[in-house]
Each structure stands twice: as C-alpha cells, then as structure tokens.
Amino acid sequence: MWRALVLLAGCGRFGFEPRPDDVLDRCAAEHEELGSWSPPRLLAAVNDPTTGDDDPVITADGRELFFTSARTGTLGQSDIWRSRRSDPSAPWEMPTHVPELSTASNENTLELSTDGLTMWFASDRPGTLGNEDLWFATRPDRESPWRQVTNEAELNTASLERGPSLFLEGRALLFHTGRTGGPGKQDLWIAQRDEVGAPWQPAAPLAAPNTSGDELRGWASPCGLELYFQASRGATMDFYLVRRGSLDEPFGPERRIDELSDAIEYDQDLRLSGDRRHAVFSSGRSGRGDLYESSR
C-alpha cells in the first residue's frame, strides 16, 4: 500500500541554520530498518508492450504517476506521460501524453516536489548548456497543465546533468553528472540553498559512494540519511543503499538491494515514497524496459 509522504524537516546541519522544530527529531524514522522488499510487481496497466518505459515517479498521495516512454504519440526520443487513479488501491488509468513537458528532444529522470506542483527532469532540448541539463516546471494545482519549462542554469554545465532528487524540504538537490571534480565518470553531487526559491550554492561531489566508475540516478530520503542509487558493480546495473547517522557524517558501506536487483538484466530509476515503504523502478527483466513496484 502506498503511504502518504510526511513532510520532514532537516535533522542535521548540512550547511543550514537550525530550525525551531529541530528540537523535535522528526527524522528519527530514517534510523529504522524496515525489512525486506516484496517481490517486484509489473505495472501491467501502464507499460506499453511494444516499447520501453522508464523514470517513474509517483505523487505523495499515490494517485498520479509520471514516467517517460517512446510509445506511439511520443514527439521525440522519449517523452513524459502520466497515469492517474482515484485512490492508491485503485487500478491505474490509461496513460496520457504530457505535451507541455515534452519536445522532439529527450526527456528523462523525473522528480516531483512533495506537493506535486514542481516537476524536475533532464533534457537536451534547445537551450541546454551541455549534453543534457536539469530543467523544471510548475503548475498551480494538480488539475492544471504545467507552465513554462525553465533551465536551472545555476546547476548545469557543459557536461551531462541527470537524475534530480529533492530532499530536506526542497533545500537540497542530489543529481549525477559527468563534470570535472568527481572521482569517476558519472558521480553523485549535491547542491544546497537556504530555502525554496533562493539561489543554489555551488554543487559538490559526495565522497562515498562515488568511485572511479559510474554512480547514477540517486534518491535521497527526506532527511538525507539514506541514499539509494544504481551502479554496475558487476555484470549488470543494480540498486545499492548507503546510510549515515546524521548529515554531518559520511555515508557508510554500501549494500546491494538484492530483492529489487535482477541477476541478469538491468535495473534503474528507483524512486521511493517518503516513508521508504513503497518503490517504483524500471527494469529490463521482462525483455524490454518496463515499470515495476515493490513494498515493505
């Protein structure tokens, strides 16, 4: 069952001033081990049997699913699509194209703000500074179309930027990039800002779990104490998890998430609910890229 995302305040320093509600450790839940994931279930009502589907992200109330696809009706290499349902236990409706966010270029690696009114994604559309950039768009409410798409120029370079993940109530953004300054090819970086709408401070690469290889498509828990990401440590692209006790500490040793990672085919684009009990991702285990879900 999809559980609603609970707004959480920052529970460590990470360059931010303390907030009055820090005395109530609202991030204590992220210290809990939640157990094993259920066997992944195919999102059959959403997946297209003729092409790949990727980059799923679900609103906090579990009623709206956005993803990317090259299915019939797509304008470019990969466009943004949406499916809705009346409540988290109802079946997903037939997906519809989101034309105001899609172009003849490539759109990928979606992320939603907690209220579902800001969409982040990567694209190489006209206006991009490099290979692919981070872009965002807003909508006034869940029934309205998305408004003007904006390049987040403060975070972009001539290299590739992908995989945005917001945490600390939108005051921090995790993404991966091939820019210089990291230890590997594609690394995980974090940018900070004092509050939503304020300028971003210069992004910095993480130490662990970055290596000389590729670390991609991270998801940071709301308080930043858990980090899920994908990497090819062996023959396939799999999911990994690192944890830390506070934002002042480095991440600890990584572990492969065996329940969600296939032994043969690739797995990617992992997104969790705010309580870390529901996950959606894409995988090639069906013979093409399809969307899956799991819970714990």
Image: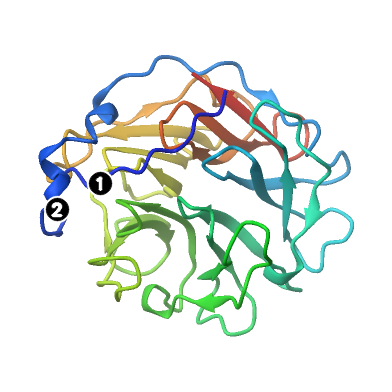
Q: Position of residue 55 (x, y in %)?
A: 62, 48
Direction from residue 269 to residue 291 in the image, left or right: right
Observer able to see residue 12: no
Query: 67 above or below 238?
Result: below
Give the SS element for disc 1. Answer: loop
Amino acid found under the numbered disc labelled 1: Ala
Q: Position of residue 194 (x, y in %)?
A: 22, 66
Q: Quadrant of residue 290?
A: top right
Q: Are marks 1 and 2 in contact (CB under 8 Å)?
A: yes
Mark 1 neighbour density, 10 Å: few (under 14) some (14–19) many (20 or more): many
Which residue is under mark 2? 19
Q: Quadrant of residue 274?
A: top left
| Mark earlier in primary sequence (1, 2) | 1
Amino acid found under the numbered disc labelled 2: Arg
| Observer-nearest of 216 and 49 | 49
Direction from residue 192 to residue 158 in the image, left or right: right
Image quadrant occupied by the N terminus: top right
Q: Position of residue 198 (x, y in %)?
A: 30, 74
| Observer-nearest of 28 and 215 | 28
Which residue is under mark 1? 9
| Observer-nearest of 188 and 67 | 67
Direction from residue 93 to residue 248 in the image, left or right: left
Observer able to see residue 237: yes
Direction from residue 286 to residue 244 in the image, left or right: left
